[in-house]
Image (cartoon, rainbow, N blue to C red):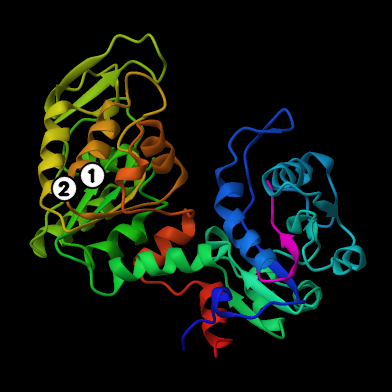
């Protein structure tokens, strides 16, 4: 069933409850990066332009459920949104106060993760959240894979539920990847552990034409192929499972390309003595911390042939110099390709933004876990709820 879109709705004189992802990083109580706020602003502004009063819901951090803690308050977010909108935005944790918002007004409701029953998707809490307004808008793609009261539960409890523009932009972008992608479809998956992405790698082999791995995941696959990874981060207990993944890829005619050279050092820190070497020559006292230039060139050639690229996770410890050159080279190869490139996950996004390449990518996703689950072809609970509530 098609999803009802907020952009198509008449919101004149109505109260709209919008679930956004405003989980911004804070440093000493101040916002250090407001890109999630900026991503949500067009939806809030559109609701105001349509003549609605707006109540915004979001989580922030990991507060203890049922307990209000000032360090997890959305006060800095409310202040920043006030600046962007040029109007006062009220912050409240009182349901009745929030419900009094008038058309043209905006209220930020305090951190939903502090509400008892949020994580458990309590039906009474879901009903209470949905009941604050006439229309419930799900716009937080990054939380769409969680069946919680403010995501899946409130959608089903609402009299009218719809998807916001930000969420729909994510789904529309993924439709290009999932429904009929331009081939070859290449996935680049980084990360520290195979254990967190084992199922993902297995599932992706059935979908993609080529799978490239980096980070600690690649180290475990290297160890499974008989190479010494010395003191590198890897998971010896998953060697056998990694062998199965490599064998499966080989039998399917799309072998996973392993690193041919690597950048190593005694430890992950700046100022180390760095050794770039062939994969068979990793010094026993060193750690693999990045792909080498030959590997970057090899991967770059594969990316050049792609019609569609999906990237989640850097291929090295890119945040520490000089171990970001491999990730930078991969990002540049994507930017130079003719492929439709979708980037997701905080580290990958930070990388492309840091290298000034974000505008060269086809789409920058706001999700991490939701990004990967959708790419695997899993049904996200909030999306399923929106489909069930569609016209």
Q: Is residue 158 magenta?
A: no
Q: Would you say 329 lies left or right of 134 here?
A: left
Q: Position of residue 240 (x, y in %)?
A: 26, 52
Q: Would you say 314 lies left or right of 257 here?
A: right
Q: Would you say 296 lies left or right of 370 here?
A: left
Q: Height in image: 297 above or below 156? A: above
Q: Which residues are magenta?
A: 50-61
Q: What label sits on residue 187 in the rendered view?
A: none
Residue at 73% across, 56% down? 113
- On the question of residue 363 being in view, the answer is yes
Q: Position of residue 287 (x, y in %)?
A: 31, 23
- Find the distance from the CA under tag 2 to the CA under tag 1: 7 Å
Residue at 10% across, 43% down? 301
> Depth check: 331 or 347 in front?
331
Q: Position of residue 244 (x, y in %)?
A: 22, 58
Q: Secondary structure at mark 1?
A: helix
Mark 2, residue position: 303
Query: Are the residues tagged 2 and 1 within 8 Å (C-beta)?
Result: yes
Sequence-first tag of 2 and 1 = 2
Q: Position of residue 106 (x, y in %)?
A: 77, 59
Q: What label sits on residue 334 in the rendered view?
A: 1
Quadrant assignment, res 391: bottom right
Residue at 75% across, 59% down? 112
């Amino acid at each position: 069933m098609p999803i009802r879109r907020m952009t198509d709705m008449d919101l004149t004189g109505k109260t709209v409850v919008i679930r956004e992802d405003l989980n911004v990083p804070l440093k000493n109580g101040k916002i250090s990066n407001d890109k999630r706020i900026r991503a949500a602003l067009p939806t809030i502004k559109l609701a105001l332009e349509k003549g609605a009063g707006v109540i915004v819901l979001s989580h922030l951090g990991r507060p203890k459920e049922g307990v209000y803690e000032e360090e997890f308050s959305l006060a800095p977010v409310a202040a920043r949104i006030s600046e962007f909108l040029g109007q006062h935005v009220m912050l409240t944790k009182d349901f009745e106060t929030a419900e009094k918002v008038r058309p043209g007004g905006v209220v930020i409701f305090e951190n939903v993760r502090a509400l008892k029953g949020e994580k458990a998707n309590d039906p009474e809490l879901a009903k209470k959240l949905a009941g604050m307004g006439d229309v419930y808008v799900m716009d937080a793609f990054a939380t769409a894979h969680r069946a919680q009261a403010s995501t899946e539960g409130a959608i089903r409890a609402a009299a009218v539920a719809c998807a916001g523009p930000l969420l729909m932009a994510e789904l529309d972008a993924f439709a290009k990847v999932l429904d009929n992608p331009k081939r070859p479809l290449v996935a680049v998956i980084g990360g520290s552990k195979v254990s967190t992405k084992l199922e993902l790698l297995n599932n992706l082999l059935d979908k993609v034409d080529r799978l490239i791995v980096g980070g600690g995941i690649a180290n475990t696959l290297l160890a499974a192929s008989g190479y010494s990874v010395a003191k590198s981060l890897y998971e010896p207990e998953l060697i056998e499972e990694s062998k199965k993944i490599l064998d499966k890829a080989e039998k399917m005619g799309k072998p996973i390309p392993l690193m041919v050279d690597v950048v190593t050092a005694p430890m992950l820190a700046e100022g180390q003595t760095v050794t770039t070497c062939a994969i068979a020559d990793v010094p026993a006292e060193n750690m693999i911390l990045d792909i080498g230039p030959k590997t970057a060139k090899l991967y770059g050639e594969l990316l050049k042939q792609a019609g569609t690229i999906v990237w989640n996770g850097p291929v090295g410890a890119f945040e520490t110099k000089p171990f970001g050159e491999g990730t930078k080279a991969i990002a540049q190869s994507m930017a130079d390709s003719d492929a439709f490139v979708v980037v997701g996950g905080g580290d990958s996004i930070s990388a492309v933004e840091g290298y000034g390449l974000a505008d060269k990518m086809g789409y920058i996703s706001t999700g991490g876990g939701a990004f990967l689950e959708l790419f695997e072809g899993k049904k996200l609970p909030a999306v399923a709820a929106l489909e069930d509530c569609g016209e």
